[in-house]
Amino acid sequence: MSPRALVVQHQDTCPPALLGGWLEEAGLTLDVRRPDLGDTLPTAPGGLAPYDAVLVLGGSMDAFDEAGHPWLRDTVSLVRQAIAHGTPTLGICLGHQLVARACGGTVARNPRGRALGVLPIGWTSDAAADPLLGALARADGTTRCLQWNQDVVTVMPPGAVLLAASPGGEPQVARFADRAWGIQAHPEADASVAQSWADDAAPDVAAEQAARTVAAVRDAESELSATWRPLAAAFAAIVTGIATGAATGAVTAP
């Protein structure tokens, strides 16, 4: 059987999309849960036993708005359980922020304002040695990605390793624990996903700016796919290696 990844999807317009397809191509089976529609998350002790990985996707809600979106509390509990058991975990945008919260970090409004567009991030000196992101760390130090967010991790968790930051210094990619990573950007989104966000944009997003972002994603489609597809291959390789080691009784390093 192929390794199974539990996917937490928070709303219709934030599906696994490209990343989901790449992970399946790399050999993972995805079990997508929709807690916003009433799906339960396996937060009880041992609930993650059937899974070899956890993927937490994005969403328009705030990572700290548990009153308005009560399943976020369960998502944070799920991530803590995954980290405690060494289950490879990847968070995307909102998911990145929830993983940070699960590890003791702080998420808040970006004081520099909303990030929207196909924008650069710069890799740190720690990125090249990272088992997941090392293959993406460009020799020239920069990579472009789709940004569509207004919150950021404002205080990194204890022990977290910053792997990439925006030009303004906001954390963009981090290793929060030995087998837990977060990416503030949206490697999973193609132009059709971005268009769904533009169609349902927040009041503070000008229609013209949203349209320009969708067009930029469409124009950069080949670049973005070539840049971020290796993320899926690397994550699947980590998951498969650990799952195979567990199945054979081998000892696998973090």
Image (spheres, helix red, strand yellow):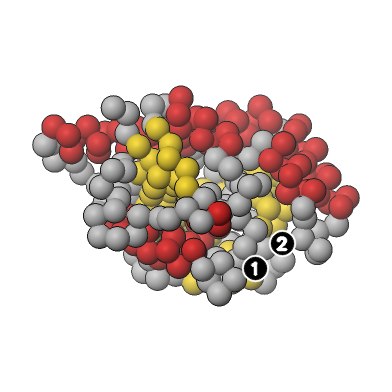
Is residue 208 shown left or right of residue 161? right
Is residue 231 shown left or right of residue 205? left
User: What residue is at 13 percent from the left and 32 percent from the top?
Assistant: 248
Q: Residue 110 carries which label?
A: 1
Q: Residue 114 carries which label?
A: 2
Q: Residue 60 carries which label?
A: none
Is residue 149 shown left or right of residue 105? right
Residue that sits furthest to the front in the current view: 38
User: In which quarter of the view is residue 220 placed?
Assistant: top right
Which sits in the foreground, 156 or 120?
156
**Mark 2 and mark 1 residues within 8 Å of each other at the beta carbon:** yes
Q: What residue type is labelled 2?
A: Arg
Which percent across, then down, holds residue 74?
42, 64
Q: Is mark 1 on a helix, strand or loop?
A: loop
Query: Which quadrant of the figure contains the N terminus?
Result: top left
Is residue 28 shown left or right of residue 204? left
- Is residue 102 placed above or below 2 in the rendered structure? below
User: What residue is at 22 percent from the left and 32 percent from the top?
Assistant: 244
